[in-house]
Image: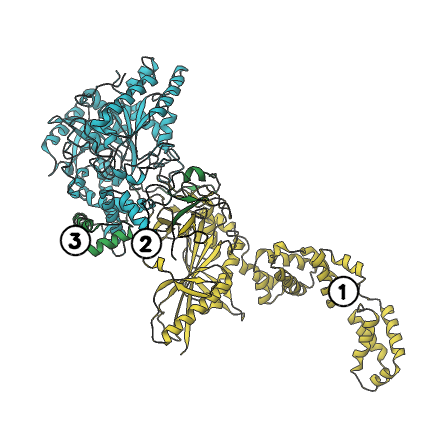
Chain colours: A green, B cyan, C yellow
Amino acid sequence: MSLTPKQIESIAHLARLELKPEEISAYAGSLGSILDMISQLEKADTGNLEPMAHPLEGQVQRLRADQATSGNERDLYQRNAPQVEAGLYLVPRVIE
Amino acid sequence: MDVTLAGLAAGLKARRFSSVELTREALARAEASQGALNTLISITAESALAAAAVADQRLARGEGGPLTGVPMIHKDIFCTAGVLTTCASRMLSNFVAPYDATVVAKLRAAGMVMVGKANMDEFAMGSSNETSYYGPVMNPWDLARVPGGSSGGSAAAVAARLAPLATATDTGGSIRQPAALCGVTGIKPTYGRVSRYGMIAFASSLDQAGVITITAEDAALALTAMAGFDPKDSTSVDAPVPDYAATLAAPLAGLKVGIVKEFFGEGLASEVEGPVREVLAVLTKLGAQVREVSLPSLPLSVPTYYVVAPAECSSNLARFDGVRYGYRCKDPKDLIDLYKRSRAEGFGAEVKRRIMTGTYVLSAGYYDAYYLKAQKVRALITADFRRAFGEVDLLLGPTSPTVAFGIGDKTSDPITMYLNDIYTIGANLAGLPALSMPCGFAGGLPVGVQLIGPHFGEARLLNAAHRYQQETDWHLKAPAGFKAGFAP
Amino acid sequence: MEWETVIGLEIHTQLATVSKIFSGSPTAYGAEPNTQADLVDLGYPGVLPVLNEAAVRMAVQFGLAIGAAITRRSVFARKNYFYPDLPKGYQISQYELPIVGKGHLDVMQEDGTVRRVGITRAHLEEDAGKSQHEGHTGVSAIDLNRAGTPLIEIVSEPDMRSAKEAVAYMKKVHTLVRYLGICDGNMQEGSFRCDANVSIRRKGAEKFGTRAELKNLNSFRFVEKAINHEVQRQIDILESGGQVVQETRLYDADKDETRSMRSKEEANDYRYFPDPDLLPVVLDESFIEAQRAALPELPDQKAERFQQQYGLPAYDAQLLTASREMASFYEEVARAVPAEPKLAANWVMGDFSAALNKEGLDVGASRLSAAQLGGLLRRIVDNTLSGKLAKEVFEVMWADGSDADAVIEARGLKQITDEGAIGKVLDEIIAANPKQLADYRSGKDKLFGFFVGQAMKATGGKANPALLNQLLKQKLAP
C-alpha cells in the first residue's frame, strides 16, 4: 500500500508537523511499508471478540473524592514556559 | 561480593565503604565512560553526593533498608524534580521537571542515590538507542554495536558496571531486549504493578516501568520497593506487593515451563537458539517440567503493536506544542507555524513516523479497519496467553532474534528494526510480566533468554531466574575493559 | 415559500464540584490566571487523570432527572485537536458510551402548550481553558484555570421549531440543573452555555436541511437572537438560489450577526479513541439508587403538586417553580395565608417579582423575606388593608425593609372596618347632599359611585370597601 504525497501532507497537517519536500516522499515510502505490515491483521479471524482497550480485564475506574488538593504553583510551572506575561501563556494570535 | 546491589548493601552495612565513597566511584566511572558509551544524558554529581551523605547518616544510625546508599541511574523518561528530564528528545532538551515520578520518589525514599539519567531512544521509540537526540549509546561488549533499546542507556550502564541498578521502561520490549543485548537482567512487571505517574507516556496501555540489574535477586529487591498501588495512576492495581526477595530460593520442583513454539521459527538466529535451549536443561535439572506450547496468534503481535502503540503515541505526544514547556521554534509567524515547526524541529524522524502512523490509523474512515481490528487481535493474542497459562506456569523463549547488531545496520528500514521486538511485544499486549536474563554468548556477544509469567506472576519469574543464576554465571560476566564489581 | 426551522441544542453545564474532573485543582471562578491549573490541567509530561466522584454522581443525577437510561459501563475517549486552550492536544470526553443515554424534558411553551424535547445523550467531559485576544498585540494569552472543569454536555434531538422553543427548552434545563444543585447556572461566568444546530426546510418536508452550528451563546437572549438571525440568513441564501454550507459559526453579540469560524473548519477529524489512561466507569445498582434517593423534588413534580395542593393554574405553577428558591419562597408566603393560595401566587408573581426584576435581583437576594410578604397578605385577608393600600404598604416595605404591621401603624393606614364609624360618615354625607339623594332614589343609579367617592375622600381611602358598599346600599334605600 502506498500513500500519496497529498495524503502524507494531510496526515502531517492533522499531526501539526511541518515536512520538507524530501521528507514527504520518504515518509510516503516508510508509512506505506508499515501499513503493508499492519495489513496482516485483515486476515485474523476475530469473530465477535470485544476490542481490548486495556491489558487487565475487569479493572474499573476508581473515583477520587472531590477535594481541592492542588495549591498555586504557577511560578514553578511557568519556569519551563517559552513565553509568559502576567501569568498568562502567550502564543501567536489565534484567529477565530 | 560487591558485584551486585545486594552485595553492595551488605558492604555498606558492614561499613567496608561508605555511600559517599561508593557514589564518588559511580560518578567517576560515569564521567570516564561517557566518551566511549554515552549511556547518560545527565550526571547529577552534586545531588548524588548530598543524598549519599544522608544515606551514610541513616546507615550510621542503623537505619535504612536493603537499597539505602546504593547508587543507581534513572532512565531519562522518569520525571525528576529539579533535574533535566529530556526523554532523549530535543523537544524536552530544556525541560526541568517540577515533580518526581512515583518510581523516583519511592526509590529515593528507600535511600537509593541517583547518580545520573540514562540515555534512551527518543520518547522510548526505538530498539537500538539510535533515535536519541543525545546520540547513540554504544554496547560495552562491542563499541561498534548497539545496546538495544529503548532502555539502551540503562542496560549499557549496568553492563559497564556504572551502577548496579537502572530503572527502565518497556512498551514493546524496551527493558528486555537491551538487557539481552547487553548481558544483564531486566524485568518488566505486570501492567499496573508499578505506577506510571511521572513516566513520560509513549503508549499508555502498554508502558510499564521496571528495572535492569545484574541479578534476579537485585531486581527482586528493587521491584519490592518500586511496585504498588498509586492513587495518581488510575491504571495502577490496588493489590498488595509481596516481598519478591523472600521467595527467590523456593524450589523449582514441579514448575511447568512452556516452550513457545512460535518463538523458535524462521528469523531466530541459530547462535541465539542454542544457548536459549540450553536453559531448559538447567531448569529440568532443578526439577522443572518442560513442554511445548503454541500461541497461534502471536505472529500477529508486531502488526497489532504497530497500530496500538503509534495510535496512543500520536495522542500522547500532542501535548508537546511549544506553548507551556519544551522546545519552541524561533519566530513563529502564526499559531499553526508555531505548532508545526516546534514539533517538526523538536521531534526526531522515528517519533514523527510513529506520530503520523498513529494519526493515520485513527483518522476518519480507517479507525475500524486498523485500530478497532488491532484491539480485537489484541484480545485474540491475550486469549492465547490465557490458554497457555492454563497449562504451564511460565513461558520461555529467546528475548531477541539476534545478538547486538552494528550501529547503523538497521536504521534505513523501520520494519527490520521493528522485528527486533517480535518476541517481546506479546507480553506488553497482554499486560504480562516478563524477564530477560543472560544465558550464554554468541561470537562474544551476550544472548538473553526470556521468561513470561501470568498476571502478577513476578515472584515466580524472579524465583526461576534466581535459581537459574545460582546454577550458572552468565549474568556475572562483565565486558572486557570494565570492572566486574562496583566497589571503590 | 414557507420554511420550517429545525433546532437542536448542545448545552454545556459546568458541574458544581469543588475540584476539577481529573485533578485536585480548585474550580472557583475568577482567580488570577493560571493559579488554579496544576500539572494535570497543564498537560505536563508524565501526569495522569483520576476521575472525580462528585462529577459522576452529578451526571447520574441529571440522567435520572430526565428519565434517561444510566450507562452501567461508560467509557472516556480522547477527542484530538490542537488549540492553545487545550493543553494536552486532546479533550477527555465520552464518545461511544456516554454516561447518560436517551431521556427527555417536557417544556411548556409561551402559549401554555407542552412540547416534549428528546435528549439524545449527556456525557461527561473536561472544559478547556480560555484564550484572551484583546489587550495584546499580535498574540493571544492563555489562562488555563478553567481547563479541566467538569462539564456535562447535554445533546438534544432536533426537536425544536423556533428560537422561542429553543429558549424555553434551555430555560427548562437551566431550572433543572439548578434544582439538582449540580450547576450554579451562572451564564455570565460561562457555567451554563449552549451551541445551537440550526437548519431550515420547506414546511412539510421530511428531510432536514444542511445545518450550521452556532457557538458562543451565553445568554437566553443571545440564543434567541442568534437563531433568528441565522434562520433569516439561511432563508435568504435558499431563496436566492444558494446552498447552506455545513459549518461552525460564531455569534457576535455586539454586531448581532453570525460569522464563519475559519479556525474550526479544518479540525473536524477528531480521531476519537478510548482514553487508555482511564478505565471504564462501572456503576452498580446501589450507586444509582443512592443517587435516585438523593434527588430533590423536581420542577415538574413540584408544579404538579402546586396545582393539586394550592389549586393553582398550570401557568402559575410553572412560573412559581422556575427555581427552587422561588418555589420555597412561594410556599412560605402561602403558609401565612392558608385560605388564599391564589392571592399568594398573584403577589409573588406580580408585585414581588416585578420588584425583583426592576433591580435585577434573584429571590435569594430579595429585600423582603417570605415571612414579611406573608405578613402583608395576612392584613389583606383580615381586611385590615384594601388591595390598593396593600400595594402602597408593599412599596414602603420594599424600600425600607420594615414589616407590614409597622408600616400600617406608622402611617395610620389601617382600614376602617367599624360599622358605626362608617355609618356615621355616610349619614353626614347623605345629609349634606339631599339633591343627589333624591336623584339617586328617582333612578339615577350611577350616583352610587358619587357617594362611595365622597365616603372614601372623608376616610382618607381607609374605609373597608365591601362594608362601605353594604352600608351605603342600606342607607340609600328609600
Q: Are the residues flagged by discs 2 and 3 from a single subunit?
A: no
Mark 1 — residue? C385
Do tag 3 and tag 1 residues touch (Cβ < 8 Å)?
A: no
Left or right relative to C449: residue C357: left
Type of amino acid at the residue the image marks with label 1: Leu
Compared to C173, does C200 lie above or below?
below
What residue do we see at 29% from left, 48% from top? B341
Mark 3 — residue? A2
Q: Nearer the viewer, residue B223 or B13?
A: B13
Q: Pick whichever of labels 1 and 2 is earlier in the sequence.
A: 2
* Quadrant assignment for the N terminus of chain B: top left
Q: Are the residues flagged by discs 3 and 1 from a single subunit?
A: no
* Distance Cα–Cα, label 2 vs label 3: 24 Å
What residue do we see at 82% from left, 72% from top? C457
Of circles 1 and 2, the one toward us is: 2
Type of amino acid at the residue the image marks with label 2: Tyr
Circle 1: element type: loop
Which residue is the extreme one toward the bottom? C442
Q: Residue C284: image x %, image y %?
A: 42, 47
Indicate which disc residue C270 carries. Answer: 2
Compared to C366, does B19 lie above or below?
above
